[in-house]
Image (cartoon, coloured by chain):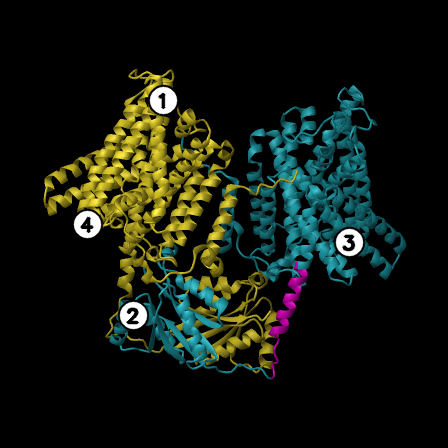
Chain colours: A yellow, B cyan
């Protein structure tokens, strides 16, 4: 009978968040999970340059893992047309691979132009004079990083849920927990170039190739047209150009993560740029080959979309049943998708710090945490991705429509930026390079428009609304910082500190050790001191005045009666009186005694109105507030 | 496709809580919902004495509304025995009514003894020397008040859900919203004696009597044994004494709320005690009559327990279909159950304030809010009741097992207290009165034991664990207050404030208007002033030292390098150095400049490390901390 529902995802989430906040505050716990703080000077000792193939594997997770959900996202769009639409996977995937090739070639131009690693934001900042274009690039990339985490983790958990249906009802909770674990690991600090991350991606690539080759062996034996193979070329009833474009837009989510190598050129061994180009070519070949082979196998086996069972899981099931090979494929998919999310925890905070150092985002994003990572950016990324997962209940197909726009918008800006760069700088073969980027720019611009329009009502509108808001917000932040800097600037010659007339008001609640302590401090400051007592009725006030006399009236005592049982009103009115009549000081200085109990839970036993009072006065009045702590002995 | 799950109960809850917290903090909003603050002197003008019958109706909601779930709770326990157990409703309800009579008579003795209104806590404090017995009484009553809110609101929503099944899946959310609305209304302030509350209870009584009379008319026409009537007397297979006791325990939840009149004697017109006795007799008659008649009708119509449809709704449905009369009955049930919860929002905070004024609970519970109610107690009651509703998903039958123990424990203590009082004070007919209370004490003690043992595994253990914890907590709180009072006491003759040696440390981050402002204030205090700069690298420190010279070095500057990018460590070490080496002052005084932006959201644009630093230093070091605000102009 007694069955409380403690296992709710939001409860779990808040528990885990509570732990993380605790980590951020309690040193001992923090040391256990996050590790010892690191010296700033340790920062540059971190990078060890990687052999190009290892670097490729380390950086490939984001792009290559998309294979697991991209073709499926495309087919989901035409699934309601029935089996007659199954063959569409071939042209849709083919179009995607063409786009992939265009993007790889364009990005190789990017690597040649910015061998120190330059994301879309850097390229745009370097090649556009207005500040809003780079902000559109960075804004859309930031949004996309958040979506990468949400989509990759959801897709990873979905892969597991395909193999173990019992997991399915807890997909949201599990996804959020994965995000938080990735956050913890990253707060501890993961070197982006840790070659250990190469292995899962390599194994996943091998397993995908193995799966596809198993398929072709099967077809060599049983024929390339099998009973399950749908017929090609018949146009299914209800197919419209719009629908086809929608399917293509969704499939384009396979191409997200293509920018990673260009951002991380310095990770490669010298000659870094040349090695990065090598890696791009290899990555293009393996990703394109996998996409085509995978799509062809899905087609031959006539596999259709099933929300309970991913297409990859179905295909693996067809060839290997649910035995060990199937298990290996599923778990590798999961691990590589988690790695894709993980790589974002380097990209997002770095980009945010870059934008923040230009004054377009809160400055706290530029501060490195104990382990030298930008921990604030990581926490924000994890929080926003978790919110997305919760809002969309970890359903990959609901998240995909929001996904690709950002990437393609930033791709477009980067390509146009490169075109402008070649026009300006020229250099060897500049016309060829420029044409490549021009083709890239036109293609990605077209894809952006297609994605934005076809997916508009499915959620793309959210991104289209959010992006301008981000840009405007960034501009407002920069303006605020500039205004504050203007306001704070002083003339060193003429503006020097000088002594002011200060009236010190001590809030007293009786005559006891805390008041003794506070009045003693007030007297040490050599300012005018007034003790202020607020009573709720006449008897209390009389009693206080008598006690004060008995104590020898160490300073002037003012008593006020609060008819509304509030401290705030009488104190505010008294401050006003002091400011305008009594002494007209330059500063009103208020001393608030505060109990500091030995055990934190004792706080609730002592009236914390002092805290509220302090917060209110700081915000609303121009007074200086001193907290005089009294540390209770027990 | 796009279907985020915003409507989740926890999300709704947090939104509403956020609103309530906002109300507690933002004056303008607070004024709209809570109303203008009231003078303390308005407190005693509130009560207008009520005619006994009106007072009866106003105070009856808690007890009389239990009719709606008590019999059903009893029958739920034997429901799995099948139709053969249906007739058990007669003996179970009969036993409940006998207990009701005993309690009414005992409580009349209570009214005669404490005509100024005395709850179980007052009676126990007056008649027991140890402090833990009154605390058991108050603790169990407080727990029970919380459960009254949870059970009444859940049962009310369940009544609505019986009529409109579409509501059922949202029962938890709706229940929590009801609690929060009741909280808001009570924060605004409801006079306990507002005679408007008499109407719904009166109408509900009339409708129950009408329902029962309709039943008897029907039986006069169709015979007292109808096809649906189960046969009496056959002992159903599987019936054990334990099960029967369990059913009885559950049915006893009908008797909660019986104490309300005895707590509120001053509400009655003079002669108050006599009128309260009249009300008790009338309330006993109507409640007992309703219970018996209602149970009899349920028996004749052979109505069985259905979690989707309350027994009351089923019975009303049998006679009136789902027409207007049925609707009226359902809505009246809902309103009266909500009124029962509402009455608790007076009882709980008053009792908590009483216990807190004896030093057993946090003192903040004794503070009256703007509208003269004990708002802190109300907020705690609403929060705990909401948590219970969420944990038990608003299922009345899961909450009932926790419910009655508290009431019966406090009943028992009150009765024993009265017995001791009669023994001590004697007075006319004291032996008779004492015997009545002795019978009451024995009966309620027996019922407490029965409820606690039979319902132990169904959730009663929670209360049995929580109660001693509350009592121990209360004793610890009182001990803490006494220790603090001892610690704070000073000798007026010998302990006078004297001037101390103070070293003032000003944290500076550069040379700008804020620093100018802060150093000026520091110089006005006539203490030793040291400016402290923490840099993250050597260049920053060099630059700062040069700027300082250029500015004319208005005071001594100390620069520290933080290798770990933390302010806390270098500042803490410097404080230690000052305390032990440099000057060895009586007080170390730290000035922290703080930006106060004009718009609250600008806060996130300025590094709030000052806030964290302040909190940490206050807690861990014996330093006095001054916040020097700089109010940004834009």
Of tags 3 and 2, the one toward the viewer is: 2
Q: Residue B413 carries which label?
A: 3
Q: Which residue is pictured at 61% across the width and 46% down the height?
A: B385
Question: In which quadrant of the rendered image does the N terminus of chain B lie?
Answer: top left
Q: Residues within 10 Å of mark 1 (few under 14, many from 20)?
A: few
Distance between mark 3 and mark 4 Cα atoms: 81 Å
Magenta segment range? B473-493
Q: Residues within 10 Å of mark 2 (few under 14, many from 20)?
A: some
Mark 2, chain letter? B
Tell which circle, 4 or 1, labels the residue nearer the N-terminal end: 4
Q: Mark 1 points at which residue?
A: A218
Q: In this view, does A412 lie to the left or right of A507?
A: left
Distance between mark 4 and mark 2 Cα atoms? 31 Å
B481 falls in the magenta region: yes
- Residue B451, percent from left and from top: 75, 44
The answer to whether the residue labelled 3 contacts the one labelled 4, judged by CB atoms less than 8 Å apart, is no
Disc number placed over residue B21 in the picture, else none: none
Visible residue check, residue B117? no
Task: Tell me the chain of label 4.
Answer: A
Q: Could you tell me how many numbered marks the image carries?
A: 4
Q: What residue does disc 4 label?
A: A126
B189 horizontally vs B77: left or right: left
**Does the magenta-highlighted stretch encompass residue A45?**
no
Within 10 Å of disc 4 (Cα), the crowding (few <14, some 14-19, many 20+) is: some
Chain where mark 3 sits: B
Which image quarter: residue A215? top left
| Dot 3 and dot 2 residues touching (CB under 8 Å) | no
Marks 3 and 1 belong to one chain: no
Which residue corresponds to mark 2?
B541
Q: What element carries label 3?
A: helix
- Disc 4 or disc 1, which is closer to the eye? 1
Residue at the image position 77 percent from the left and 38 percent from the top:
B248
């Amino acid at each position: 009978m007694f069955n409380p529902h403690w296992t709710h995802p939001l409860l779990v989430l808040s528990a885990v968040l509570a732990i993380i906040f605790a980590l951020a505050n309690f040193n001992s716990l923090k040391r256990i999970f996050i590790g010892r703080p690191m010296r700033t000077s340790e920062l540059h000792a971190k990078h060890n340059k990687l052999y190009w193939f290892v670097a490729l594997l380390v950086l490939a997770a984001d792009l290559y893992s998309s294979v697991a959900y991209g073709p499926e996202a495309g087919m989901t769009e035409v699934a309601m047309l029935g089996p007659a639409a199954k063959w569409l996977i071939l042209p849709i995937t083919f179009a995607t691979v063409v786009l992939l090739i265009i993007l790889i070639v364009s990005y190789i131009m990017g690597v040649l132009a910015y061998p120190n690693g330059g994301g879309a934001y850097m390229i745009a900042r370097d090649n556009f004079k207005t500040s809003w274009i780079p902000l559109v690039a960075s804004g859309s990339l930031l949004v996309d990083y958040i979506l990468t985490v949400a989509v990759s983790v959801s897709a990873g958990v979905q892969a597991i849920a395909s193999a173990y249906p019992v997991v399915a009802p807890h997909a949201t909770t599990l996804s959020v927990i994965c995000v938080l674990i990735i956050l913890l690991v990253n707060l501890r600090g993961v070197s982006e170039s840790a070659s250990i991350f190469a292995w899962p991606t390599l194994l996943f690539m091998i397993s995908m190739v193995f799966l596809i080759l198993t398929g072709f062996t099967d077809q060599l034996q049983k024929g390339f047209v099998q009973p399950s193979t749908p017929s090609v070329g018949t146009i299914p009833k209800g197919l419209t150009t719009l629908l086809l474009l929608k399917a293509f837009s969704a499939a384009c989510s396979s191409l997200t993560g293509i920018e990673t190598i260009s951002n991380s050129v310095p990770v490669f061994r010298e000659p870094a740029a040349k090695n990065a180009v090598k890696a791009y070519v290899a990555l293009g070949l393996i990703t394109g080959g996998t996409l085509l082979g995978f799509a062809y196998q899905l087609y031959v086996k006539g596999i259709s979309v099933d929300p309970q069972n991913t297409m990859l899981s179905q295909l693996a099931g067809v060839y290997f049943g649910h035995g060990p090979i199937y298990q290996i494929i599923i778990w590798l998919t999961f691990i590589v998708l988690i790695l894709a999310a993980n790589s974002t925890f380097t990209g997002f905070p770095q980009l945010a710090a870059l934008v923040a150092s230009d004054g377009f985002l809160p400055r706290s994003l530029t501060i490195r945490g104990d382990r030298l990572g930008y921990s604030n950016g990581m926490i924000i990324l994890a929080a926003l991705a978790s919110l997305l997962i919760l809002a969309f209940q970890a359903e990959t197909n609901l998240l995909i429509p929001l996904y690709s726009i950002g990437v393609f918008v930033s791709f477009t800006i980067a390509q146009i930026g490169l075109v402008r760069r070649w026009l300006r700088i020229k250099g060897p073969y500049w016309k060829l390079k420029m044409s490549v980027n021009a083709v890239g720019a036109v293609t990605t611009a077209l894809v952006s428009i297609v994605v934005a329009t076809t997916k508009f009502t499915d959620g793309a509108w959210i991104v289209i609304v959010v992006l301008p808001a981000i840009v405007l917000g960034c501009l407002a932040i920069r303006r605020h910082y500039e205004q504050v800097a203007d306001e704070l600037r002083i003339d060193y010659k003429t503006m020097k500190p000088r002594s002011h007339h200060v009236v010190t008001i001590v809030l007293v609640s009786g005559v006891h050790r805390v008041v003794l302590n506070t009045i003693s401090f007030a007297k040490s400051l050599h300012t005018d001191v007034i003790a202020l007592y607020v009573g709720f009725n006449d008897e209390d006030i009389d009693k206080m005045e008598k006690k004060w006399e008995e104590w020898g009236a160490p300073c002037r005592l003012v008593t006020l009666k609060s008819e509304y049982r509030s401290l705030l009103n009488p104190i505010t009115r008294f401050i006003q009186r002091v400011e305008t009549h009594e002494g007209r000081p330059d500063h009103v200085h208020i001393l608030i005694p505060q109990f500091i109990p030995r055990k934190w839970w004792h706080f609730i036993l002592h009236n914390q109105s002092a805290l509220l009072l302090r917060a209110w006065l700081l915000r609303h009045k121009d007074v200086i507030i001193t907290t005089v702590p009294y540390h209770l002995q027990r």
